[in-house]
Amino acid sequence: MGAPILSDLGTEILIPVCAVVGIAFSLFQWFLVSKVTLSIDKSSAAADDKNGYAAESLIEEEEGINDHSVVQKCAEIQNAISEGATSFLFTEYQYVGVFMVAFAILIFLFLGSVEGFSTKNQPCTYDTTKTCKPALATAVFSTVSFLLGAVTSVVSGFLGMKIATYANARTTLEARKGVGKAFIVAFRSGAVMGFLLAANGLLVLYITILLFKLYYGDDWEGLFEAITGYGLGGSSMALFGRVAGGIYTKAADVGADLVGKVERNIPEDDPRNPAVIADNVGDNVGDIAGMGSDLFGSYAESSCAALVVASISSFGVNHEFTAMLYPLLVSSVGILVCLLTTLFATDFFEVKAVKEIEPALKQQLVISTALMTVGIAVVTWIALPSTFTIFNFGAQKEVKSWQLFLCVGVGLWAGLIIGFVTEYYTSNAYSPVQDVADSCRTGAATNVIFGLALGYKSVIIPIFAIAVSIFVSFSFAAMYGIAVAALGMLSTIATGLAIDAYGPISDNAGGIAEMAGMSHRIRERTDALDAAGNTTAAIGKGFAIGSAALVSLALFGAFVSRAAISTVDVLTPKVFIGLLVGAMLPYWFSAMTMKSVGSAALKMVEEVRRQFNTIPGLMEGTAKPDYATCVKISTDASIKEMIAPGALVMLTPLIVGILFGVETLSGVLAGSLVSGVQIAISASNTGGAWDNAKKYIEAGASEHARTLGPKGSDAHKAAVIGDTVGDPLKDTSGPSLNILIKLMAVESLVFAPFFATHGGLLFKLF
């Protein structure tokens, strides 16, 4: 077998050091962003021109105007957006906090009742010759890890939102000096969020393992079973963040677009539009806070799935600490790789023109993937014995270290493929989106038809990439291989989050430029940043969905093992009915979230119309709209509407497991995974394509685009309607579906002992 090169002490030092380095790097990036001041004090500007801030004052001569009020206006708008986002998140967290406490109590009661709340040690599940800690201990520690995961997820989302709202106006001001300056500020701000989230998630999980180990000692099976609550907490908070944030942002966006752009023919983010502040707030609470919690949940769950399987393999049986924490070592090296990759965008190369923005962001994906491949090889070489065994449905499968390297590597490169396919189908630089834009010549109906067809077609290659990843990783290392493949896809999460968060920051920057009355030239620069951001956001969603498929399958395998199911036979009625119901759930969930956006948008449209019709001088710009009422409509609607979809996801495994048992639940999990992934990819890419088709017409950068425009033309109005239909698909239903499939799987895993002992009540009666 051979001992790993890296000692246990080395592992204990390496993981927290990498996490601390990630946090320190994020704080340094934040410090650089803060150098761009939101004041009119000329002495406050800093001297380093390369890093996104310059010696000259922010107030420059621009087209003959030296207007100090522009900066003041930017600061006021930023404060309004920040206050709105903070207020919404605090309101959301109050409701979510109640759920968190209630569900924690449920975890304790259900898991504690497995052995009748006994405090006696019990035979281990996989080695009955040894004794393990009581089920009551698992109940207590699972509850604690659930709360830790939930709090970390909430904090991740909240910090991301604060950073984004801190950076948006600064990006706008830097756009006055050139697109390169604005790009660096937006990207650095995204990097702050990416590194904070990746490092915090790793550090909290590592510290939790060490603290739990003080009680569990040699009972690693019980220890890592209790750790699964961490992933459940992370994803349950992400679900509510994604759904509520998605409903909030799309209600405002749809209301602002339909009345402002289509009916009143005023520009996007025009300060006369009453829904404009709510729209900008929504970008932060949905695309930043919700997305941050979502990817944190994916990371936590893939780590937990790998640790659970490893704990009953030779790593856990032989108490090989370094090999056991291989998933965390991969994530640790990922932080260092992403740190180096970030420097390519901010220091090694400089963006000087609009056409260089999107290649610079794509370059981040390629560089991080290439460097991470080397990083994985090094970690595998120093942290794993040359040969070991992995638990595989009741047997131990012999695996070589190079095979595990291939498992992680295939996940990593599958993520890159999914990213590039997503970019191809959602970027207006390529023919699919240009074809969708061209279809707007004949109206909104053909635009919708072409957009739907594009979304369905975009599913093909990502599914093949996921299928190849599953086949290779399962062939080499069973369910552990799939879990580490998911971790491979998420190993560059800091870079993925940086380019993802960059999008909403750029979007907000454009809105602030419009509302502050900046010139058309500045708005063109922020629109160029935003168009690239739309594509990177779509790529981020592709990563999230692809990793969710692998994570869910790994969790599914861990659940099947934990529930002592030897085979899942789809020909048995118990499993097949679960398969049908599971495949239906993503449609039910999507219907709920889409209708929620529609209902909230309806109220928003009516309110915006009312203000335009009843406030004298609003269209002329002599009167101010009532922004607060629109913010309240979005807040109230999103909080109210998030409850039903959240309840559907959280209650389904409990109801199925208790009433129908683990076999039917395994069918439900398989069905929801298979259909959920397809719908999620299709919805996200359709919405992204419609959005960029609209921007393609608005920008008028090519001869073809100019024949479709300008803004206000019939083709442009058709594109706006397509974008409006796509908004809830790409920002509410699509991204939320990957949480649905992960969350149901991890919840089933956490409650597996209870379902195996007390589940299937209906079948027991008959």
Image (spheres, rainbow, N blue to C red):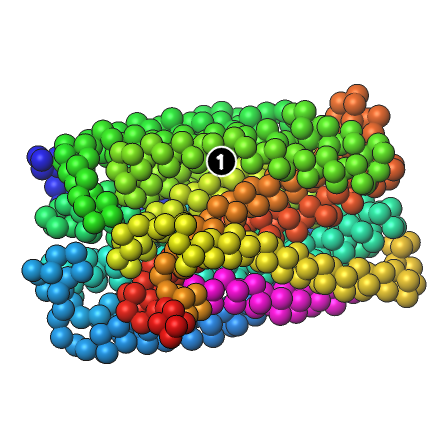
Magenta includes 753? no
Residue plotted at (42% across, 35% down): 467
Q: Which residue is found at the position 41% from the left and 59% from the top?
A: 574
Quadrant in the picture for residue 359 = top right
Which of the two residues, 311 or 429, is positioned nearer the viewer here? Answer: 311
Indicate the position of residue 118 as horizontal and vertical percent values. 19, 78
- Residue linked to disc 1: 463
Residue range in magenta is 626-654
**Residue 216 or residue 574, whichever sits in front:** 574
Query: Is residue 653 positioned above or below 395 on the image?
Result: below
Drawn side of residue 237 relative to residue 59, left or right: left
Residue 489, relative to residue 759: is it above or below? above
620 or 223, which is in the foreground?
Answer: 223
At 51% from the left and 72% from the top, the residue drawn is 94
Q: Secondary structure at mark 1?
A: helix
* Image quadrant where one finds the N terminus: top left
Residue 344 x %, y %: 45, 28
- Residue at 12% from the left image edge and 41% from the top image edge: 7
| Mark 1 nearby-residue class (10 Å; few <14, some 14–19, many ≥20) | some
Work out whether residue 703 can be spotted: yes
The amino acid type, in three-letter code, at marker 1 is Ile
Tell me residue 452's x, y (percent): 68, 39
Instruction: Describe residue 47's horizontal placement relative to residue 592 as left or right.
Output: left
Look at the image and say whether residue 647 sits in the magenta stretch: yes
Q: Main secondary structure of the magenta part?
A: helix
Q: Which residue sits furthest front?
A: 766
Horizontal side of 528 relative to 437 (left or right) equals left
Q: Position of residue 239 (x, y in %)?
A: 50, 59
Report the number of discs: 1
Residue 716 sits in quarter:
top right
Q: In the image as oriented, which residue stretches furthest toward the top? A: 703
